[in-house]
Amino acid sequence: MPEGDTVWNTARALERALAGDVLTACDFRVPQLATTNLAGWTVAGSGCRGKHLLLRLTRDDDRRTLHSHLRMDGAWRVFRPGDRWTGRPAHLIRVVLRSARSIAVGYHLHELTLIPTGEEAAFLGYLGPDLLGADWDPAEAVRRIAEKPDRSIAEALLDQRNLAGIGNLYKAETLFLRGLWPWTPVSEVADLAGAVKLAQKLVASNLGRWTQTTTGSLRRGETNYVYGRRAQPCRRCGAAIQKADQDERITFWCPRCQPNP
């Protein structure tokens, strides 16, 4: 699930593979960038902001950033020259970046855009505090969430304008651990700051590894409390985990541990 930790890990992988390299070739397979040629540009580094990936490039005095968003199904894969590209069908490739030592392939990327690096802040200025960034400010995140008291807490946590980096998995797991019914109005959440701080803690706990766990176990089938576990017994009380549509997304919860107030 490409949430804040996955994007952070992807940025680090691109950094290790390409930072300092001069691109020898590129191939964009999206209409808006089809004629763009980044050969000769140097990869200055790779970063992220919430769920947004930022690959920074330089050439002479010019600075550009290749912005991409993974959404639900996007991914970057790194290969060495001569390796077979595996993991995704070729028709999903949106961009290929080549250097002498690495090939970075972007699959099913969304919002693929090339912008001046100096405009990053304005381009992503609508985002709330980054759960994994230097600007993380739980008090500001709480303030933004509280501005819409009638909104459900689940929807508020997913809104990237409130806090950047949390997705459906960490939303569901945070609400379970806080004992909150997903449809609870923000105004009725007794400890909003506690929920926000827990969400950040869960996302940050998986930095540096691809397996996302909220239970502490890395074993297959044991990584989550409620997410993806419809009809399975709650690890805490044994009740069947529920799944339902909510605000054009799905949500998971335990009807006993997270009762409708």
Image (spheres, helix red, strand yellow):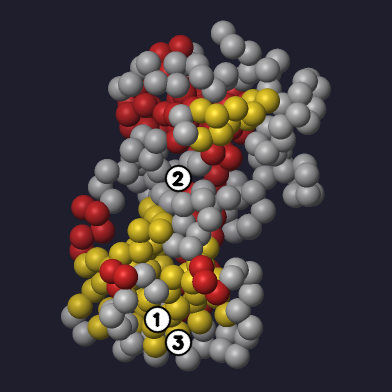
For the residue pair 114 and 46, the one nearer the viewer reads as 114
Question: Which element is circle 2 on?
Answer: loop
**Could you tell me how far apart the alpha carbons at marks 2 and 3 are, in whole angstroms?**
30 Å
Amino acid type at circle 3 is Ser
Amino acid type at circle 1 is Asp
Give residue 165's mark: 2
Give percent across and percent down for residue 41: 31, 84
Q: Quadrant of residue 62?
A: bottom left
Give percent across and percent down for residue 185: 44, 16
Q: Is residue 256 above or below residue 227?
A: above
Amino acid type at circle 2 is Gly
For the residue pair 255 and 124, the one nearer the viewer reads as 255
Quadrant in which the C terminus is drawn: top right
Give residue 99's mark: 3
Nearer to us: label 1 or label 3? 1
For the residue pair 77 and 16, the one nearer the viewer reads as 77
Q: Earlier in the sequence, mark 1 or mark 3?
A: 1
Q: Residue at x 45, y 85 (%)?
A: 98
Give residue 27's mark: 1
Give percent across and percent down for residue 205: 60, 46
**Could you tell me how far apart the alpha carbons at marks 1 and 3 are, in whole angstroms?**
12 Å
Q: Residue at x 57, y 19 (%)?
A: 181
Question: Which element is circle 1 on?
Answer: strand
**Could you tell me how far apart the alpha carbons at marks 1 and 2 are, in whole angstroms?**
29 Å
Q: Is residue 225 visible?
A: no
Crowd tier of the residue under label 3, counting other residues whose Cα lies within 10 Å: few below 14, some 14–19, many 20 or above: many
- Asked if the residue under mark 2 is in contact with the one under mark 1, i.e. CB atoms within 8 Å, the reply is no
